[in-house]
Image (cartoon, rainbow, N blue to C red):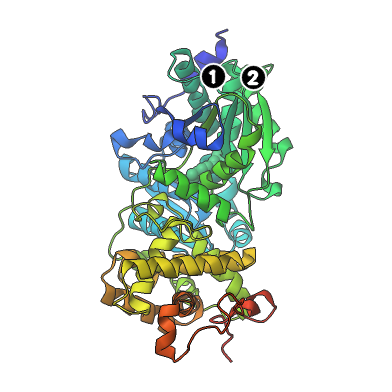
Amino acid sequence: MPGRWMEIIAAQPRLGWVEQPSPVEALPEMAASLGLESLWIKRDDTLGAHVGLPGGTKIRKLDVLLAAPPWRDAPGWASVGAIGSGQLVALSAAARLLGRTLRAHLFWEPPLPGLLENLAYVASGPGDLRYTDTRVGLALRHPRALLSKRLGTLAVVPPGASALLGQVGVVRGALELAAQIEAGACPRPAHLFVPLGSGGTLVGLLAGLGLAGLTDVTVHGVATVERLYSLEITLGGHVREVLRFLDAPETTLPTLRLHRDQLGPAYGVATPASLAACERFAAAGIGLEPIYSGKAMAGLMAAAQGLRGPVMFWLTPRAPTPLPAAEDWRARLPRRLQRRLAASTQVRSPARRRVMLGVAGLAALTTAWRFTGYPEPPAGLEHLPRWAAGALAAAVEVVVTPTLDAAGVSDILRRVDAFLRTQPFEIRVQVLGAISLVEQGAGLLTTRVSRFSRLPPPARLEILDALVAQGGLAAEAGRAVRDLCMLGHYQRPESWAALGYGGPWVPEAPRPDPYGVWRSSAPPPGFEAES
Ligand SMILES: *Cc1c(COP(=O)(O)O)cnc(C)c1O
């Protein structure tokens, strides 16, 4: 039943970035492998491509928000985000397109290569950067950057662009889906999955689906932030606020189910389940990133068994193409941030280092294109994902012996995988973290931007040496990867003769686990504290 809300939405000015519906796409093979009736993807990664914007659901928010005062009339915008924030990337792209400036108030987040790519893009854009170590410090020092609508001549864009008008942009997205269902482009979903960050996306979709009468959809919000930032009661309040603004306060809403089991250690930190989801969907041509959409997809995969009817996934990230950066982007950063970045590869405490290695390494994989383009791994690997197998194979080729044939490399990978099977979860996370730091982290330390595995062998050796010479986390990652290669190599009977070892006396005898110590509280080999 059309209501006044339609007119109110139509009356909101827009920048014209979302004039075409983002496509809905079926993934029949993925649906079959997950045991779902059907699986559909709402491809928001395509948004804004016609005007050169990077895509993602935030384009929907900015399309409406930036077209309204005070943002419309300001010569520039101010906003707050972590140093690798995707919201600041979207705003920076908008500033370039509309000839505005962006003052980015940054707070600290571990400087991982994928996030550095975002930082480099924002630093290369028009405007300036301010830096404070913590979010709290930022709130104290620049309260107006967080709380007010204006900062001098600049208009403030709230965190996540989740202001009321941003949410109205997402309401339009839900209406767009309703029209696609009506037109037969896809079935009416029984379940819709979406990540929950600042909440604007979920709030807009709930309100919009309610307005469209799609109230028999169960909306699944997969939390990617701590509970404090995503309380049901706050979400409900925002939905009501949107509906009041649209003069439709009595609207019936779809059922909401929140999933809080995919967050992992913290916001901004990848989990193995999210990385596995990223990799699986990258192979199907769908670009997830592990901080939001990877966790949401992991939530879908974990719930798949119990889902009846068509399932839809709202693809929120930008398109997975690398962002351009100016040569001198580091020089454009505030001095304090430069110093902190330089110091950040030197973590002193060994216990903290081990945690950081897993966290830092995995979070290095923050953009989906980092998962693509790897060769088929040897069959039967359980714990080495395709990207890790590819990176480790590239290390084996230079660490073990250059004369090793492909079958030898595969054999070593299988032995490393078998070793990982015996290890507890935290160790597996650390190992994957180390591999990804070597694979993606080279650009953090050297001028190289390529992945480790794409470099010619002499350059790979150079990178491993440079990492070890760097000290801190980088050195631990480099050493851990070298140790893994050798661990796999020395388990091969072919290597024993060179050591003067005749092999085990009893062929089937269980071999002592050389890394058994990893299960004790002592630091594992390659993770020793420097005195
Ligand atoms: C910001 C963002 C989200 C979260 O949306 P909210 O509206 O903040 O909840 C989800 N996915 C991606 C890729 C994002 O960048």
Q: Few, some or many C-alpha atoms within 10 Å of disc 1 (few <14, some 14-19, many ≥20)? A: many
Asked if residue 140 lies left or right of residue 461, the reply is right
Residue depicted at x 40% and y 79%: 494
Q: Few, some or many C-alpha atoms within 10 Å of disc 2 (few <14, some 14-19, many ≥20)? A: some
Taking the view exactly as shown, the residue that stands out farthest to the top is: 1
The N terminus lies in which quarter of the figure? top right
User: Residue under circle 2?
Assistant: 216
Indicate the secondary structure of the residue bearing disc 2: loop
Give x and y (percent) for residue 36: 56, 31
Asked if residue 90 lies left or right of residue 232, the reply is left
Given the image, on which type of amino acid does mark 1 rest? Answer: Arg
**Quadrant in which residue 213 is drawn:** top right
Residue depicted at x 58% and y 22%: 209
Give x and y (percent) for residue 92: 38, 48
Residue depicted at x 50% and y 80%: 472
Viewer can see residue 348: yes
User: Residue under circle 1?
Assistant: 188
Asked if residue 105 lies left or right of residue 404, the reply is right
Which labelled disc corresponds to residue 280?
A: none
Given the image, on which type of amino acid does mark 2 rest? Answer: Asp
Disc 2 and disc 1: Cα gap in Å? 9 Å
The reply to whether callout 2 and callout 1 are in contact (CB within 8 Å) is: yes
The C terminus lies in which quarter of the figure? bottom right
Indicate the secondary structure of the residue bearing disc 1: loop
Between discs 2 and 1, the one toward the N terminus: 1
Residue depicted at x 48% and y 17%: 181
Is residue 339 placed above or below 24 in the rendered structure? below
Asked if residue 42 lies left or right of residue 15, the reply is right
Q: Which one is nearer the viewer's eye here, 258 or 243?
A: 258
